Amino acid sequence: MDKRIILGLILTLAVALLLPFYFFNEASRMEAAGLAYQAESAARGVILYKDYCAECHGANGEGEIGPALNEKRFLSKAHDAVLFDIIRDGVPNSAMPSWGQARGGPLTDQQVLDLVAFLRGWEPTAPLGKTADATPDPKRGADIYFATCIACHGKDGKGTARVPVALNDQEKLARHDNAWFFEVISKGRLDKGMPTWGKVLSPKQINDIIAHLRTWQTTAAITPAAQPTPTTQPTPTVTLVVTTTTAAPVGAVTPTLVSAAASATPTLPPATATATARPVKLAQFFPASKPSASKGEPSYTSRCVTCHGPKGDGKGSKASLLDPRPTNFTDPSKMRGENLEKLFDAVTNGVPNSDMLDFKEKIDEAGRWDVIAYVWMTFVNQPDKVTAGRAVYEQNCRACHGDAGQGDGPDAQALPTKPTDLTNAERLAALSSTELYEFISKDGDPLHSFGQKLDEDARWNVVSFVWTFVFGK
């Protein structure tokens, strides 16, 4: 018999004998690989949960404004596909937004799967769920009310222009018992536009809301954690001096210019100049380090995107329910007249007569500045404008103001007046982009008449770039 045939038979026999052992070990190998992949996915989910979910569902999934997730009853009923769909698509008519990119959120499908893997990791040791203390809690109900009901019924329960149905009505509160309110909230009144909240909120959460409504019968509404009572402490003030000019648009103001000689570089006004004064609140103004836009992005995504939208255009998933509508940060006609002091105050203390809540207790001071940095350098001063402004600055401004904007450029020493330090955050924070634009455009001596030297777009672009001296990436 040919040796090659014999060798082939031997090899075939060897494969036939080894193949069962391979199949026997393959199942355990695949299982181990799957567990390792699951562990890696869950590890990524830990970070995502902290950034996007903990605020509503609690650091350990115990539930706060949102329902508890770390419960065995819940996890045993909610299969992975159900969890994936809820996270990606959100829950209509609730505070649960759509987190998937396919629905306008920030998360990829893989990141949603990572969150599901993390949540599933709780199941083996998850408690059955809280059964103690079933007494309705008006404080917790206030939190839920502000997360789910405010868009239609308003902060104080007096109704809104969109839905003029007052809940804070003594006659209505006296006429209807708790069972009536429970049925209306849980089953809705579809003929009147009232959604079916029983599909979103648990019976306990609905009872908590009713307990909050009852506080209106005899006392003012309990202030929720997201809406703390404003402090009565006086806020320190500093005065920024501005003067009106006939060349400026109606309502605009232009900083007073100080020029020691005809050839001097214009500087922003000193705080002691005499003119029409405008108070600027020092709301724990500017931290020691530059606020970071990248650090502010997660907070914007988790707290602001449902109203202001992922593009900052005021078109979030809840925007159509709000009156007035959320601010469109990409609208130059609106935002160029705003200053950072006013924006910080809005984020910290909320905006009266609107649905803009305060975040004083939810985000620390540095975090609020990071959110502002993200909004200011992503939507208000868009990256392409900043890039274009950098080129204008380097060609026209760097020689006096320096590479870092500190007023120490190579030509600065020859000037009678030191060029403005553009890194002085507290001074710039009190100015709007319009005021900076007018300052750059104001005709000085022939060498610094940028109103004639640069076109309008170039001047606006360099304003956008100047803000990079105040905010970090």
Image (cartoon, rainbow, N blue to C red):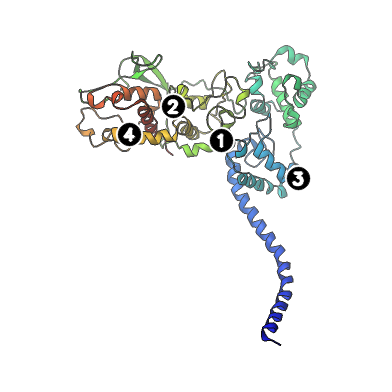
Q: Is residue 430 visible?
A: no
**Taking 308 as reference, is 173 above or below it?**
above
Cα–Cα span, label 1 and label 4? 32 Å
Residue nearer the viewer, 176 or 419: 419
Q: List x then y, in percent, for residue 50.
A: 59, 42
Give the residue at x 71% y 44%. 81
Three-letter code, disc 2: Leu
Extreme top residue here? 171
Q: Is residue 292 visible?
A: yes
Are dots 4 and 2 in contact, CB under 8 Å?
Answer: no
Cα–Cα span, label 4 and label 3? 60 Å
- The mark nearer the N terminus, 2 or 3, is 3
**Label 4's element?**
helix
Residue for badge 3: 76
**Label 2's element?**
helix
The quadrant holding residue 264 is top left
Give the residue at x 76% y 27%. 186
- The mark nearer the N terminus, 1 or 3, is 3
Residue for badge 2: 340
Residue for badge 1: 301
Q: Is the residue marked by circle 1 packed among few (<14), some (14-19), or many (20+) residues within 10 Å?
A: many
Q: Nearer the viewer, mark 4 or mark 3?
A: 4
Three-letter code, disc 3: Ser
Cα–Cα span, label 2 and label 1? 20 Å
Cα–Cα span, label 2 and label 3? 48 Å
Residue for badge 4: 393
Cα–Cα span, label 1 and label 3? 29 Å
- The mark nearer the N terminus, 4 or 2, is 2
Cα–Cα span, label 4 and label 2? 22 Å
Three-letter code, disc 1: Thr
Are dots 2 and 1 in contact, CB under 8 Å?
Answer: no
